[in-house]
Amino acid sequence: MDRTSPLGAFLKARRARLSPDDVGLPRYGDRRRVPGLRREEVALLAGVSAGYYTRLEQGRQANASPEVLDALARALHLSPAERDHLYDLSSTTGHRPAVSGDDEKVSADLRTLLTTMAAHVPALVVGRRNDVLAWNRTGHALLAPHLDFAAPDDPGGRPNLSRLVFLDAPTRALHRDWPAKARAVVGNLRILTARNPGDTHLAALIAELTARSSEFRSMWDAHTVAPCGSDVHTLAHPAVGELTVTQQTFDVPKEPHQSLVTFTAEPGSPSTAALEALKTRGRTVDVPVACAPTP
């Protein structure tokens, strides 16, 4: 019986997207029942036996050496991010230990930075499962003014950006190119789950999205890998109209599971004017400041 592992499922998905023409193999005029390369063709390109590769893909071979992983990455034309993902999925390379505890906390210094940035840059801090741990007023006004500003201060009710994109109607309406945003979210979740295979709460989030969204199921099955970095989004904001922003994600020093996410616009553009209007709106929202996006 085929007991496909996460590693095997990823290999199969990447094999399916390539044709013999893509990798310089002859077709011999054959008619293929399924798209993509055959297992024996991937094995040939990687310099391993067909039986060994088949065991890897079917989950009957749990281990692969770094040399074999590199050979498979070359054979399957993996991007650098996909190659890193392949390593994360392999049991021989080791995994980052699962982080225990649910109450992720934002340092006082980082909260001060968020508050200071509010006058110029919408920003938020996300945790290891894409939960919003904190945001400044402008970041809240940009992404989720329909939610309580203090929601991130409740560990049990924090907005989750992945859940918002797929299950929250206002967030979906916010993104002009929602499919592109959704694919990016799924690609990032693939990376998070491979790096944290023992995180039961992350697994529960995936299970919830799979059960509640057919679009998520389809995108998840594609095994796309997309690390967070810099991306441009056009937003249809209910208060200030359409604007185009650049989203950038930065790792937080000394907090390896936290990221600072910022949004900026081209100087002098209409989007900058829209952000300025939003900043004013964010400063006038009457909500209490906490002491210390998921519907």
Image (spheres, rainbow, N blue to C red):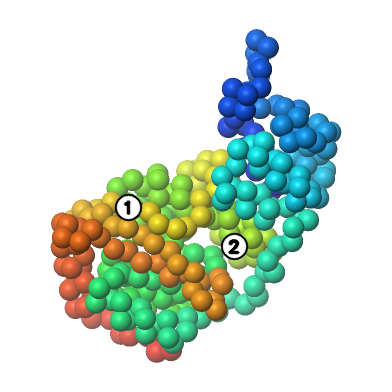
Residue 93 lies in quadrant = bottom right
User: Residue, x 23% and y 81% (percent of image)?
Assistant: 286
In the image, 130 versus 122, the foreground residue is 122
Q: Position of residue 3 (x, y in %)?
A: 77, 42
Assess whether mark 1 and mark 2 are in contact (beta carbons under 8 angstroms): no
Q: Residue at x 57, y 49 (%)?
A: 80
- Where residue 145 sits in the image (x, y, percent)? 29, 67
Tag 2: amino acid: Leu
Q: Is residue 3 visible?
A: no
Under mark 1, the amino acid is His
Residue 238 image offset from top left, x and y in percent:
22, 58
Pair 2/1: label in front: 1
Q: Residues within 10 Å of mark 1 (few under 14, many from 20)?
A: some
Q: Secondary structure at mark 1?
A: strand
Asked if residue 91 lies left or right of residue 17, the reply is: right
Label whose residue precedes the other's in the sequence (2 or 1)? 2
The residue wearing badge 1 is: 233
Residue where numbered disc 2 is placed: 202
Relative to 20, is 49 above or below? below
**Residue at 67% from the left image edge and 69% from the top image edge:** 98
